[in-house]
Image (cartoon, grey):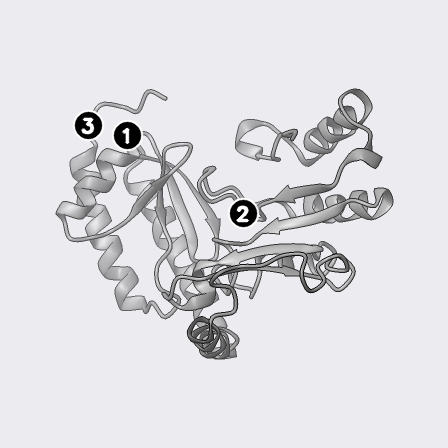
Amino acid sequence: MFHAPFPIEQHDISVKDSLTALANLFKVDIAPSDVAAIIVEPVQGEGGFYQAPPEFLQALRTLCDDNGIVLIADEIQTGFARTGKLFAHQWADGKADPDVMAVAKGMGGGFPMGACLATARAAEGMVVGTHGSTYGGGPLAMAVASAAFDELTNPELMANVNKMANFMTQQFERLKQDHPEVVEDVRGKGLLIGMKLKKKALDVRNLARAHKLLVGNAGDNVLRMAPPLIISEDNVREAVAILDAVFTEAKDMDDFDG
């Protein structure tokens, strides 16, 4: 297994830098013909809420096609309308569709389940008897996923995700302006959104919980939020008001030293 740098503008890593690193890896460490697959998160979750630029995903698709490599998308956090499209790789306008996709979480609408999806070509070797799962294809899980999928593909739901995502981003940018000593950056995609903080995100998360607001934290000292897809404008306003009070208190915390 080899790792290549993810294109992150905030860390001065461009798409060109990432692709050059991949090219160098193929020259020095392993030949493309020996590579089984490339795995990528269209939006990094635990890594800090960084979105892969569409042109990067498109370049990976081309690279895989040219070298017979399987492209795997990790859409466990980003899939099922979370970013404003059914799957986050679709922001590349159909030019970065994966061969294999890992999905879970949102697909069950709260019911614990996951799946591995593959194109017919990628799944050619997955014939009867080559793989088994004790709980795979359970009737209850399948019924739940079917019902959830009907809701997740409702155009009204998707419209709400994008409308609320835009509103939340605007409100978070305002919080950044009002609390420059606490908030450094607003990032993410759709309703997978976070704020990189100048104070320790874990401490701010705990402070928010004391104010009756549940949020998470992720890598790169990010305060993370992944609200329900049916969130309303009133819900957002209430959360922003709490965060405003939390950040006012947090400004007296020691700066994060990471």
> What is the crowding at mark 1: few (fewer than 14 residues within 10 Å), some, or many (at least 20)?
many
Q: Hey, which quadrant is residue 126 in on the image?
A: bottom right
Look at label 1 and name its amino acid. Answer: Lys
Decide: few, some or many residues near mark 2? Use Cα within 10 Å; few <14, some 14-19, many ≥20.
Answer: many
Q: Nearer the viewer, mark 3 or mark 2?
A: 2
Q: Which residue is mark 2?
A: 43
The spot of residue 118 in percent (x, y) is: 68, 60
> Mark 3 = which residue?
253
Is 119 left, or right, of 162 in this rendering?
Answer: right
Residue 179 image-quadrant placement: top left
Q: Quadrant of the C terminus?
A: top left
Q: Earlier in the sequence, mark 2 or mark 1?
A: 2
Tell which residue pokes out farthest to the front in this image.
129
Q: How many marks?
A: 3
| Distance CA(mark 3)–CA(mark 1) | 7 Å
Image position of 197 (left or right of 83): left
